[in-house]
Amino acid sequence: MLSSLGLTPTDQQVYEVLVEHDPMTTAELCAEVGFTPSRLRRVLKRLLDKGIVTRSPGPPERFRAVPPDVALGALFVERESELKRARLFADHLHDRYVDSMTRLHPAELVEVVHGAEEISRRVEQVMRSARGEVRFIDKPPYAQPPRALHPVERDLLGEGVGFFGIYDHQALEAHDLLADLEAGLALGEEARVVAEAPMKMILADRHLGLIPLHTDRPTITSAVVVHRSALLDALRALFSALWSQAIPLALPGSPPANGDALPPEDARLLALLTTGLPDRSIAKQLGLSYRTFQRRLRALMAHLDADTRFQAGLRASAKGWATLSVTHPSRDLPRRG
């Protein structure tokens, strides 16, 4: 349990005994833990060196546990400092790596990767290399079927890395609404939808990207890793252009500015309606039969006092229940990387 603090199982065993007892002699400790005197002396030396056990002079010598909140707290602070230094060194190595990419031979600016497993591994590497932001365009086909929010995205969002995603209509149908899309939005992902994306891609800051080699097959079997180059700049420009035209995917259940909240199930329905997904696809995402979906849609339109979907969209927007994409491209996408 305490191995992350540099304690071995035997160190922890002896410390736990001392925590639960009055000061003990070497003989008493040997009897309690079943160690030989020589083995116990080695353990006690490590505990004394770490400052979590104290020794009172004899005869005979007695050993006492330093209170855990003091002793282990100090070890936690020490380990956190070590991790911080390691993180700074890793960032320094990352900067050196990025600089080295500018000296690559032109033939080395792109790498072709084969196989679903290797592509998935490189996708994770590309994302984890980001320090400021990850931009991605999501559309079929996939190397691995999307079932839930990618654990790397979950980790990086928690570390403050921005995620900006553009979803093709077909991608919305492939992802799970609650376990994937809403999970990412709740953690801070910013998502938009387009009717048809020209390609899929992942971009990490300004130094690395990944695109499939073919998009006309059921699954991705080959991909290209793109290092810093004019090609990577072009991919970033393509993403920015699509982002400015895409429809924001609002987080269902978020309270609107005027406080007139919409029930979560209706918010999900409305959010998917604004993306332009076909009715049957929306019903599938919501886990509803087509007939139930139609009934829910009619009820929502009645709630909005709307006769048409267009009118419903306008009234939902007026209430703060839908977001219209009217921002300027230059101010629309934050620049972090």
Image (cartoon, helix red, strand yellow):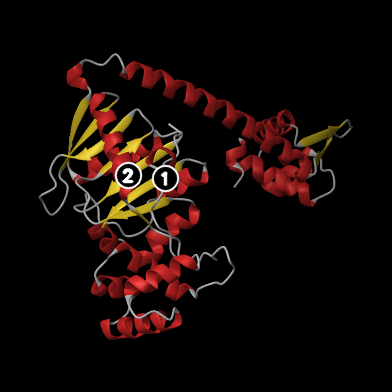
Residue under pointer 1? 163
Question: Quick one: SS at disc 1?
Answer: strand
Residue beneath disc 2 = 136
Which amino acid is tagged 1?
Answer: Phe
Residue reaching furthest to the left:
216
Asked which quadrant contains residue 224, the reply is: top left
For image coordinates 44% across by 35% down, the residue present is 335
Residue 93 shown left or right of residue 220 in the figure: right
Query: Mark 1: few, some, or many residues within 10 Å (few <14, many ≥20)?
Result: many
Residue occupying image coordinates x 29% and y 45%: 242
In the image, taking residue 2 as reference, residue 185 lies left or right, namely left
Residue 124, position as x, y percentages in the image: 34, 41
Whether residue 94 is situated above or below residue 26 in the rendered picture: above
Camera sees residue 251: yes
Residue 8 placed where, x, y %?
A: 59, 39
* Dot 2: element: strand
